[in-house]
Amino acid sequence: MLHIEQKDEVVNIVIEFISRMNLWETQMYYLSRIRRGEYVKQELYEKYKDLDKQKLFEEYKKIIEDTCTQRERVYGGNPETASYGKPPKYNGINETTIVESTLVKPDRIEVVAKGGNSPDMYVKFVLFKKNGKWRIDNLLVRFCDAEWIRAYI
């Protein structure tokens, strides 16, 4: 059984990850458009034109460090190869769209949220408890009632 404190802790980690990644993706998206000379509305140009790409790469690493398990990631986990777009990957996911939190093992919890870049998309955040802290280890996605497939962070 999942205790209220555990649920609050893991949901907070997921929400922190989502909000920080959505902000990072948005910043990278607009900075990249500006750097490539592509059209950006004036107000967005002013907001994002002075961002430092290297600082954004450092922020990405910090997000992973703060919210994810520390391990080698073949896909995801590297700011230079990370994908970003508009809308961001986790667009629309928030505390109200979390539909399930399941304690699978004493050191493993799965949190399922509806949302993302498709209204029929579900994202499963798999968290492990390492050194007394819950961290996101991997993601799975599915559309409607299809099978879960592995996704990169």
Image (tube, rainbow, N blue to C red):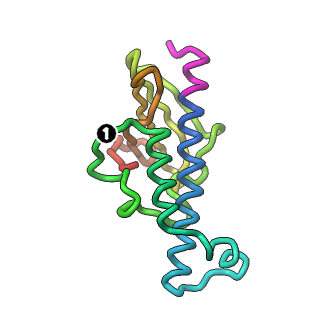
In magenta stretch: residue 103: no
The relative height of residue 107 versus residue 80 in the rendered view (above or below) is above
* Residue 132 screen position, x and y as percent: 45, 20
The relative height of residue 143 versus residue 11 in the rendered view (above or below) is below
Q: Amino acid at mark 1?
A: Arg
Q: Is residue 119 something one can see in this rendering?
A: no
Residue at the outermost right position: 43
Q: For mark 1, what is the residue?
A: 71
Part of the protein shown in magenta: 1-9
Assess disc 1: are there few (<14), some (14-19) or many (≥20) residues with their C-alpha within 10 Å of its C-alpha: few
Residue 49 quadrant = bottom right
Left or right of 5 on screen, residue 63: left
Left or right of 42 on screen, residue 79: left
Residue 78 quadrant = bottom left
Residue at image coords 42%, 24%? 129
Q: Is residue 73 something one can see in this rendering?
A: yes
Q: Considering the whole magenta stretch, tell me its main secondary structure.
A: helix
Identify the secondary structure beneath mark 1.
loop
Residue at image coords 71%, 82%? 42
* Residue 112 screen position, x and y as percent: 49, 35
Left or right of 139 on screen, residue 16: right
* Residue 33 screen position, x and y as percent: 53, 78
The relative height of residue 41 versus residue 108 in the rendered view (above or below) is below
Q: In the depicted view, which residue is nearer to us: 34 or 106?
A: 34
Left or right of 40 on screen, residue 90: left
